[in-house]
Image (spheres, rainbow, N blue to C red):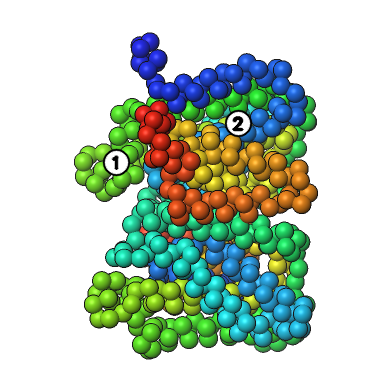
Amino acid sequence: MNLRSILSVGPTLWGIGIFLVILGGSAPWIPGFLLTLVTGLLIWATLAYSLNLITGLVGYVSFGHVVFMAFGGYALAFGVGALNLHPVVGVALGAAVGLALALGIGLVTLRFRGVYFAIATLVIAVAALYIVLDIEELGDGKGIILNPAVEPLSVFYTILVTLAIEVGVTYAITHGRIGYGIRSIKGDEDAANTLGINAARIKLFVYALSGLFAGAAGGVYAWNVSGAFPYSSFSLTFSLQMLAMIVIGGMGTLLGPLIGTVAVYLPSQVFLTIPLLSGLQFTVIGLVVIIIALFVPGGIVGTLRKYIPEFRGMLE
Amino acid sequence: MADAALFLSDLALGVLLGCVFAVIAHGLNLIWGVAKVVNVAHGEFIMLGAYGAYFLNLWFGFNPLLSIPFDAAIGLGVGVLFYFGFLHRELRGKESMDLQSEMVTLVSTFGLSLVLINTAQKLWTPDNVGIPWSPGYVVFGPVQLPLGGLYVAIVSVSIIALSHVFLSKTYLGNAIRAHSQDIPAAQLVGINPTITASIGTAVGFGITMVGGALLTVWLPTGIFPAMGNLYAPISFVIVVLGGPGKMWGSLVGGLTLGVIINVGQLFLGNNLSLAEAAAFLILIPVLLLRPEGILR
């Protein structure tokens, strides 16, 4: 990659890059409560981009993405709690666990298409909870509690770097040679196979990347809340919220997951602070998801591209 | 011999539980078979059925079995609304579901499930409630069975049998089956696709909500807004095990799951959570080896 091709990556990637750099540069001066909010936002954005890889780009709806996140969190909690690793190494361990798990699960479930894949991933996530409840090293049903000596800034920078890498990887695989393969699988998998595209290998590759980043995000999440607990880590709400984010932002786009995260996460936090509305945030998110799925395919980014011609060349 | 007695009673309980699992999955099976749509919000309609039974009990003192007709009526209405709200736009004028429409229905019904769970939590609080109804036990040799569970099992099997008779012996049922097999051919012989698909979906919802009411007999304190998160995956597994669109498939799948969960504990060292994991994971080999379901 020479300098010119790096400079000509397009306004969307530039925009996200500048946004992340500004966020990173100003972090030491952001007040504590706001930093917590932004860290949460970045964790969710990492998760949304991770689901976007398999569901948005390849078109395989996964309801069980939480499984990578949860095991990533457990990997960090186990690594830091039992092996005394540094939390950043723990996050790397979480990413490795997510990758390995995605390779294993993907090898089997990626053979199923459409709803069967969605159901298989959902069922694996539910079964994984019951298995973890029974593993003594992972704290049986109680989970693992870490010392809450968290430095907010190191959590923040870890997730910022992870997200930056993830966005870069998303850009690289959509613009590289493999991107054609991914698009053709989304369009018509059988036709792609006939044209000599190794669909099974491409799907597994993308799913593994997706598991890797979800595992890393899960690790950071566990680090941030100082522990991993079975019922909350494996809560299907996580999978559902990730899916809502990419549906609202725009599936399969480069900017969509970030926009969707902001659109889902910030209002939810506002709702939480108002007693009358607290608990209703998911009702509103659900209504928005229904409306977008039925009437506005493409989400926010897709709609902007459709109705404002100037954005067509800029947004991706 | 204590072990054999334990095995027998676990087996009997598994069969009873399997029957009620079968009926909660049966509604999903019908919708999946007729409209070729997987309703991700299925678990939430089970929850609504359970709450229907709970409130009928709270206000009028009905037992869960008495609340069946009311839940069924509500379910039929909700099913028609659901069809025209969520499915009609995607199914209208199409000869078969494509992947794009499948994605739209998956995502939109998933949004519906978010709405229903969280509205229910706001309305009825996230706490567990239950129906105090236990008609006693009946003893067969070494096996002691809860009478409530027995009634529910009988009703469940009758519902599945009735739906089988409805689909294979009545004109409307045959129309629904014809529609599910080949839409253009069904239209050629004068079957209105919208009416058949909406009736099929409505019947499916009616059975789902009745299933929720029947399930409450097994859950003395287990009715809560997020209960669908457990029973929806169970229903998905059952329908895939039996094969979508096969009426007896739900019974076969339900019995398989009920027996694995109850008898599996014995072989896995009295470990309920591992038995439940096994019951869910059986889906994977079935999908790999017999994607059309256990039944032929």
How many numbered marks have been drawn onto this rendered protein structure? 2
Residue where numbered disc 1 is placed: A184
Q: Residue furthest top?
A: A3
Q: CA distance from mark 2 to mark 1?
A: 30 Å
Which residue is located at x 30 percent, y 29 percent? A177
Q: Residues within 10 Å of mark 1 (few under 14, many from 20)?
A: some
**Residue A34 falls in image quadrant:** top right
Q: Position of residue B124 (x, y in %)?
A: 74, 64
Q: Position of residue A102 (x, y in %)?
A: 48, 40
For disc 2, the neighbor class at 10 Å (few under 14, some 14 to 19, many from 20) is many
**Measured along the vertical axis of the image, is residue A25 above or below residue B186?**
above
Comparing A128 with A159, the one in front is A159
Q: Position of residue A119 (x, y in %)?
A: 48, 56
- Circle 1: element type: helix
Q: Nearer the viewer, residue A139 or A279?
A: A279
Task: Tell me if residue A150 can be seen.
Answer: no
